[in-house]
Amino acid sequence: MRAAAVLAAALLLLPLRAAADSSEDYVLHCRGCHGPDGAGAPGAAPSFRGQLGKFLLVPGGREYLIRVPGTAQSELDDARTAALLNWLVREFSRDEIPAGFVPYDSAEVARNRHAPLVDVWATRHELLVAIDAAAPPAPAAPAR
């Protein structure tokens, strides 16, 4: 009976451990380029802050996040990569997550991570143009 209680308690803690693993994976695999706060390095590593969720709004953006070299070439397995992507989106871009967001899973990562992304910056630029086009217009300034 005691073993069952310990097992039940351990199962309740699994989601917390997954989050801890993802934050640790960020420190070990992403922080070196994207920084401790996800702000990136201009011209080298783009910022995650307030940005990642926007890629989920346009066709190809979701796959792009899997196919960028840092993700696609990571030594993490597909399940840990999916968990890290979900953590990154929620940690650095919570306000931009579209309604109905479906979390990444290992099968999606496996399907997409091995398709080479030949020109990362050009693909990113095209997606940013699509994101800008999809954005609602800014409210007009009040008349004086």
Image (spheres, rainbow, N blue to C red):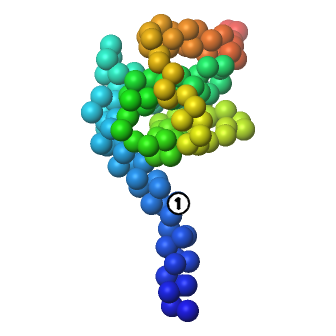
Q: Residue at x 31, y 22 (%)?
A: 41
Q: Residue at x 55, y 92 (%)?
A: 1
Q: Residue at x 55, y 42 (%)?
A: 106
Q: Determine whether, in the image, residue 107 is placed left or right of residue 43.
A: right
Q: Nearer the viewer, residue 113 or 39?
A: 113
Q: Measured along the vertical axis of the image, is residue 80 above or below residue 15?
A: above
**Picture quadrant where residue 76 is located:** top left
Q: Measured along the vertical axis of the image, is residue 80 above or below residue 101?
A: below
Q: Nearer the viewer, residue 79 or 140?
A: 79
Q: Mark 1 = which residue?
A: 15
User: Is there any visible trace of residue 10 in the rendered image?
Assistant: yes
Q: Measured along the vertical axis of the image, is residue 115 above or below residue 110?
A: above
Q: How many marks?
A: 1
Furthest-bottom residue in this view: 1
**Picture quadrant where residue 97 is located:** top right
Dot 1 amino acid type? Pro
Q: Measured along the vertical axis of the image, is residue 87 above or below residue 95?
A: below
Q: Nearer the viewer, residue 96 or 121?
A: 121
Q: Determine whether, in the image, residue 99 is placed left or right of residue 64.
A: right
Q: Determine whether, in the image, residue 137 is placed left or right of residue 81.
A: right
The quadrant of the image that shows the C terminus is top right
Give the image location of residue 84, x and y in percent. Answer: 46, 42
**Picture quadrant where residue 39 is located:** top left
Q: Which element type, helix, strand or loop, lies under badge 1?
A: helix
Q: Residue at x 44, y 29 (%)?
A: 72
Crowding at dot 1, Cα within 10 Å, few <14 / some 14-19 / many 20+, comes out as: few
Q: Determine whether, in the image, residue 75 is placed left or right of residue 19.
A: left
Give the image location of residue 115, x and y in percent. Answer: 51, 21
Q: Nearer the viewer, residue 59 or 76?
A: 76
Give the image location of residue 118, x and y in percent. Answer: 45, 11
